Image (spheres, rainbow, N blue to C red):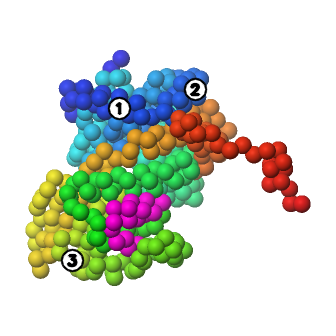
């Protein structure tokens, strides 16, 4: 059945189906979970609202939840990451969709509110976009919600603040903090896909260039690792002294961001914070500098200040805006400062998102059965979910983990 949806062009559905079917071929963990855990009826009749990057991998998660009996509604978490062909395919397969690529700010906001107005029991969130709006603008719907799960570091930061203020009235599972999410998605997925997007959009050679990585959390670690793998000279800037020393110990150069501004050829941000690069940095950057963001929001560098400072701006390549400063220096911003790996490319590899969305699917499954026994506020993902996802992936690879003997288990548990 085709439910009411709002998509840009239903005729694009065939290409969206091809993309989704490709994901289905390369997602053994999700397929296993769908055939086992999700098939137990826990999600049957549940209303699930999702806001997440609307491309083929996300679409496959939505479809599996729908096939498990949930009534699924999806909207995009980033205006530029939504793919209209995937939206059309999802709508054709019976998932309600409120999303278009590059909508106006007003329309984007409207999609999120329409998704919430379906009165969800469960929320799969990205950046706490739905949970935040639910609490602030739809208090009458809060009582319907059993619980939610959160995809991103940025969202976890917001939800911790909500928990501290005691305004979060239901449990939210920190999917982002699951080992099978952040150790793989945040690090390998972001590193791989951001560098791939940088290379494909610029058509430039990265080897030998000075790549400045802003932040050395799991995302920063991945950015540094993959830039280093391409032969770049990696420089890390980080306010946490322990993390900065860790970057140094990994063999990267470390320095203050104002120093790095003078030597960097490419700047990659992934901090979850705002204005980590601003006017002082722009004033020191070399002609031809490239700026790309791998964080959730488009304010990791101060684009408003750059626009105000620039004498002229122009699109010099698809997804690249050139800002010419009064002294003639040119700074190049990829994907309007939005999440470059998904706003200007296809995002993380399928095999990485297979792990992440397996965590999300199991989080929804867990909440459907156990939310009533859970305290409100941000909660860790149960360890058994990490273990199940890891074992499913290893099984798909034909690998069996070591098994400890009774003697070894006893030894580990004893102090004698």
Q: Is residue 102 magenta?
A: no
| x then y, percent, for residue 142 | 51, 40
Residue at position x 39%, y 80% from top?
256
Element at label 3 = loop
Quadrant of the rendered structure where residue 351 is? Answer: top left
Element at label 1 = helix
**Image quarter (top left, top right, bottom left or bottom right) of the N terminus:** top left
Circle 2: is it few (<14), some (14-19), or many (20+) Cα within 10 Å? Answer: few
Q: Is residue 21 left or right of residue 319?
A: right
State the residue in front, 18 or 62: 18
| x then y, percent, for residue 333 | 22, 63
State the residue in front, 137 or 281: 281
**Label 2 sits on residue:** 36
The stretch in magenta equals 218-237
**Label 3 sits on residue:** 286
Q: Closer to the N terminus: mark 1 or mark 3? A: 1
Nearest-to-viewer mark from 1 and 3: 1
Q: Closer to the N terminus: mark 3 or mark 2? A: 2
| x then y, percent, for residue 75 | 35, 38
3D distance between C-alphas at marks 1 and 3: 42 Å
State the predominant SS element of the stretch in magenta: helix
3D distance between C-alphas at marks 3 and 2: 55 Å
């Amino acid at each position: 059945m085709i439910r009411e949806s709002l998509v840009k062009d239903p005729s694009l559905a065939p290409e969206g189906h091809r993309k989704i079917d490709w994901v289905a071929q390369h997602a053994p963990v999700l397929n296993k979970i769908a055939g086992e855990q999700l098939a137990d009826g826990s999600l049957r009749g549940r209303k699930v609202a999702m806001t997440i990057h609307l491309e083929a991998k996300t679409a496959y998660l939505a479809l599996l939840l729908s096939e498990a009996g949930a009534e699924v509604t999806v909207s995009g978490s980033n205006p530029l990451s939504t793919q209209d062909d995937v939206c059309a395919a999802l709508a054709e397969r019976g998932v309600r969709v409120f999303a278009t690529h590059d909508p106006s700010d007003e329309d984007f906001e409207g999609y999120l509110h329409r998704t919430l107005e379906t009165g969800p029991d469960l929320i799969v969130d990205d950046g706490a976009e739905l949970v935040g709006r639910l609490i602030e603008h739809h208090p009458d719907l809060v009582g319907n919600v059993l619980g939610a799960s959160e995809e991103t570091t940025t969202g976890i930061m917001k939800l911790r603040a909500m928990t501290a203020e005691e305004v979060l009235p239901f449990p939210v599972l920190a999917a982002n903090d699951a080992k099978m999410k952040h150790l793989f998605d945040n690090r390998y997925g972001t590193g791989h896909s951001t560098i791939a997007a940088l290379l494909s959009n610029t058509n430039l050679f990265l080897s030998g260039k000075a790549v400045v990585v802003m932040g050395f959390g799991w995302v920063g670690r991945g950015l540094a690792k993959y830039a280093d793998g391409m032969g770049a000279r990696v420089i890390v800037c980080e306010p946490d002294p322990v993390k900065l020393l860790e970057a140094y110990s990994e063999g990267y150069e470390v320095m203050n961001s104002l120093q790095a501004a003078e030597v960097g050829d490419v700047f990659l941000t992934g901090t979850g914070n705002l204005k980590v690069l601003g006017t002082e940095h722009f004033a020191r950057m070399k002609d031809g500098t490239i700026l790309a963001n791998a964080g959730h929001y488009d304010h990791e560098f101060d684009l408003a200040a750059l626009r105000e400072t620039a004498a002229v701006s122009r699109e010099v390549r698809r997804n690249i805006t050139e800002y010419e400063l009064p002294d003639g220096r040119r700074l190049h911003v990829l994907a309007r400062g939005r999440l470059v790996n998904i706003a200007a490319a296809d995002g993380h590899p399928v095999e990485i998102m297979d792990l992440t969305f397996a965590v999300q699917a199991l989080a929804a499954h867990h909440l459907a059965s156990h939310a009533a026994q859970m305290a409100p506020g941000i909660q860790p993902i149960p360890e058994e979910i990490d273990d199940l996802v890891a074992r499913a992936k290893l099984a798909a690879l034909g690998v069996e983990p070591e098994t400890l003997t009774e003697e070894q288990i006893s030894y580990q548990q004893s102090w004698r």
